[in-house]
Amino acid sequence: MMVDADDIDSDDDDSEDEDDLADVPDTREFTPLDLEGLQAMGIGGKAGGDEGYTLEDLQNMTMNNDEFNEEDDDEEEDEDDIDDIRIRDQDALILVAKAEEDFASLEINVFDTEYNNLYVHHDIPLPSFPLCLALGSVVGSYQKNENNGITAGNYVAIGSFEPGIEIWNLDVMNALEPTLVLGGMDTRGSEEEWMRMQMPLSTSANGGGKKKKKKNKKKGTAGGLREGSHTDAVMSLSWNTVHQQVLASGSADGTVKLWDCTHSTSGKKGDYIRPSATLTHHTDKVQSLAWHPSEGTLLATGGYDRRVCLADARSTDSQNVKTAKLRADCEAIAWDPHNQQYLTVASEDGVVQCWDVRKFGGDPVWSMIAHEYGGVSDISYNAHVPGMLLTCSIDKTVALWDTLNPSPKPTPCGSKDMNVGRLHSVSFYPSSPWLLACGGSGNEIAIWDVEGEDTIQKRFAGRTSGDVNVSTSNTEEEEPDFEEVMAAGDDQATTKALEGMNKSKKKKGKKGKKVHKRK
């Protein structure tokens, strides 16, 4: 294709004319900058002074220079980030263990009680589907400090389908690994085996030479379980409130193990925490555990062998265990915090029963059918309101009960469909008498503030001021010391302690019975 040279020159001339904007007048309008007026207000800087911005600063501002605004914006963003993660006094923390298809996590939710706002503060990915949680405050870590690795804080123990128990520090965001692992798989042997496979043969590196005959040694238990670990899923956990470093775990292998989370021992398989004791009084899966609120060696357990047991934590002898029979599998256990001699048990058939541990093994103090369809999945006592019991069920509802005058059974005080599917867990908020939360099969949580419920307030509001006479361990005559009796080494230590508790209660007469006579 041929092109005329004159055409090319003319095109270049046109383009140069178009690009030449020097003669084009500037028609933009600018608002004049009144520097004297700004100086009069102390903005532009006074003559001979350093107050306010200088004229050079103002000129830079008019030239769209953002140098002065960038630092302020960064500071505001940092403050906003800190404000998002700050926990305030009016915030309620809710731990939620979730499982979605092939992903499991632990969510730390914050509920702003002032504005009724619920959001996820941070979450922790979990390697296996969680089954139970327990809150604690004292553990030992792998990193040594001035206290030999013992640290105090906010920790959660998580039981899952794996035989190991992971303990995570809730005060650390974006944690990469748990603070502590109790039991579970022993990865030490597999790591040594991997390193051995990576090492080249010495004969090939040095050239010829006589091959040495290898001795037939036992291979390490790569991929095996740690010594003393559970051998099946961990279904229940309970942290001791008296001896705060002690954690109890119940498993599908039918055993109950006690762990001192601050004491590790050395062995053939390494230096890690081993269980202090293993209890074998159950013949099936152990579904529920609960330490006594004030007696640090008394542990209540419930299992799928349709038994609820009282065990002496200082003795592994199965004969030193008190037992009561159930008509169905045990689902949940709770001690009454205001009447600590009462142990309440919920079972799969929807029945909730309460025993006086001073007469444990006989007839219960009261029994009721809390939920006719689906059974009872969890129960919780209100730590601030005496006699206030909460139950939840697979029928998607929670129910409130008054156990202060259970003649012949507790009084129903209302129920509610929480609209989050089948309910598996329920709990009162420990820092508020009227706030409760529950978790359902829809991977959601629901919060119910019963302070606005007139019927519930009429029955329970007067009990929070302390005008109800509640028989607790702080009475005129001192209770027998469980630990002192059990430390004697008698096989019937638990029986004697319970009998002593029973005798001391009888001496108190009518004063200890007022709880069941006042409404």
Image (cartoon, helix red, strand yellow):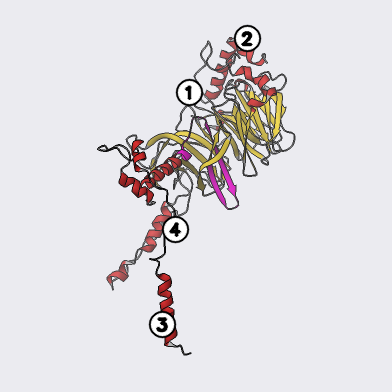
What distance separates the C-alpha of mark 4 from that of mark 1? 94 Å
**Residue 254 percent location from the top left of the image:** 58, 40
Q: Nearer the viewer, mark 3 or mark 1?
A: 3
Q: Which residue position holds label 1?
A: 483
Q: Would you say 214 lies left or right of 48 here?
A: right
Judged from this view, the residue extending furthest toward the left is 48
What distance separates the C-alpha of mark 4 from that of mark 2? 99 Å
Q: Nearer the viewer, mark 4 or mark 2?
A: 4
Dot 4 or dot 3: first in sequence order is: 3
What distance separates the C-alpha of mark 2 from that of mark 3? 119 Å
Residue stretch rendered in magenta on the structure: 83-107
Dot 2 or dot 3: first in sequence order is: 3
Q: Where the C terminus falls, by quadrant?
A: top right
Q: Is residue 255 visible?
A: no
User: Does 149 sit above or below residue 360?
Assistant: below
Residue 87 lies within the magenta run? yes
What distance separates the C-alpha of mark 1 from that of mark 2? 28 Å
Question: SS for tag 3?
Answer: helix
**Residue 310 percent location from the top left of the image:** 57, 28
Type of the residue with mark 2: Lys
Type of the residue with mark 1: Glu
Residue 314 lies within the magenta run? no
Q: Which residue position holds label 4?
A: 27
Q: Which residue position holds label 2?
A: 510
Q: Which residue position holds label 3?
A: 9
Q: Residues within 10 Å of mark 2 (few under 14, many from 20)?
A: few
